Amino acid sequence: MEKDYIRFEHVRKEFPGVVALSDISFSIRKGEVHAILGENGAGKSTLLNILHGVYQATSGSVYVDGKESRFHSTYDAIMQGVIKVHQEVQVVENLTVGQNIALGFEMSKYGFLDYKDVYEKCDRILEELGCSIRSKDSVVGLGVGDLQMMAIAKSLYFNANIISFDEPTSALSVPEIEKLYEIIRGLKEKGITIIFISHKLDELFEICDRVTILRDGCCIDTKEIEEITKEDLIHLMVGRDVSSYAQRLNPLCADKSQVVFEAKNLTGLTFRDISFQVHKGEIVGFAGLVGARRTEVMRAIFGVDPLYSGELYLDGQKIEIHSTEDAMRHGIGLISEDRKREGFIPSMSNNRNVNIPSMGKFGRKPLGLLDEKAMKENFDAYAESVKLNIRNPEHRTLDLSGGNQQKVIIAKWLATNARLLIFDEPTKGVDVGAKAEIYKLMEEFVAQGKGIIMVSSELPEVIGMSDQIIVMREGRMSATLTKRSEFSEVGILSHAMEEKR
């Protein structure tokens, strides 16, 4: 357990005009669960990409089991047992579970694929992991938890001795998270070295042995997890005090005499009888367990999914929303929980993504050409308002850190002068420093007399940021909490779990 198995020595990585990593040196012991922690943009992903052969270091060395390792591709890394379990597992839907696990590395006899041996080996691994899925099952319709188990099985199929996990619990339910912890502990007992990246600090104390903190491309420190506190970790990560990053600086500023938005008896495919109000300057939090259908309600309000019945009001006026265009025209914006698929256009620049909803006001008559100067000025103004830390507005949003991607999306909606913003899991996959900045932006928005609906699976976030909390269970409202004395994790969970009578 005490032997250094992975060693980074003076690793540096430069991209054109950017130093992503600067003189990174630390070690990881064999058979430990080692967390790499840092804000978005700290260099975590770059470092792992070097280890896994995606990038080559500009200078410095990486040693695995005493030997210098310079993988020139992910294939090279996999062949040496260095495997990454990605946050979003990619599958080929027309192949079975076993075929996806063995994809590209199938066993063969006499030049022909031997799926009998593939399926037998995959089933042994899946059974060992305690999975209910089997190798001949279709991957179509598998849940996030099963897909992740399949990815872990793939790593064992290739006899992994190093497995890295990148935000592995971001989309898992509580039982699935506990199952993952159990599996990681089992891998550790087999002597497999685990690298664990997560923004959820509680997870680190639950599952990790040591943690290395990166900041601005530099290695700050490596600590035994039992010798450090959460507050210490946050301070090392951000280099500044973020004492309570899920707490309103100006709570309860809502004007209850003025209703910005009202939903009456909304019913859709998966939810029924949803009624609530958002007052001027108010943040309304939506809490619930997996399957509560909170996101589905928000998608219907924004016109993505149909409403079967119910009424919507904005500033006291009844409105009809049958499409996202209708919602935007009425001054409603949605910061989706799936920012990479729904929040921005991956191929477009930061400038374009911020200006997309406002594009109509940048047309030049009579030719209809876009006023690029006005668009740049608009981008600069809103990028500054959200403290978007980027060097080039013409670079792709896709290439930004998760925190900066979220800021681009928020800037996009702020530029529309929206009256109501819906934040669906606003800090998912975002570090604590960026969380604090997003919370501040939310407060600034409601301070202008506007309203926010916030869906979050993080109870401290819901409790800390909300003026009122609506708890949902299986598509129905189970409680509306309007007094801060009612805001507690136990209370919210009890409402989220109790049967409607």
Image (spheres, helix red, strand yellow):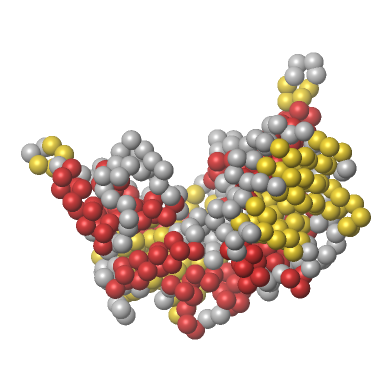
Residue 370, above or below 147: above
- Residue 108 appears in which quarter of the rendering? top left
Instruction: Count every numbered label the image shows and give the total.
Output: 0
Using residue 482 as the reference point, say whether residue 458 is left or right of it.
left
* Residue at image point 30% right, 78% down: 1
Residue extending farthest to the bottom is: 227
Residue shown at the point (59%, 61%) measured from the top left: 499
Residue 480 visible? The answer is: yes
Task: Looking at the picture, tell me which residue is in the foreground, 94 or 431.
Answer: 94
Which residue ends up furthest to the right in the rendered image? 257
Work out whether 389 lies above or below 196: above
Residue drawn where x is 26% and y is 48% of the image: 135
Q: Where is residue 411 in the image (x, y as percent from the top left)?
A: 72, 46
Closest to the observer, 32 or 57: 32
Horizontally, residue 184 falls left or right of residue 325, namely left
Image quarter in which the C terminus is found: bottom right
Single out the residue that lies furthest toward the top.
Answer: 366
The answer to whether residue 432 of the structure is visible from this angle is no
Quadrant hosting residue 63: bottom left
Residue drawn where x is 31% and y is 70% of the image? 186
Where is residue 101 drawn, in percent x and y? 29, 48
| x and y percentages locating residue 264 in the rendered image | 77, 45
Q: Where is residue 260 in the image (x, y as percent from the top left)?
A: 84, 48
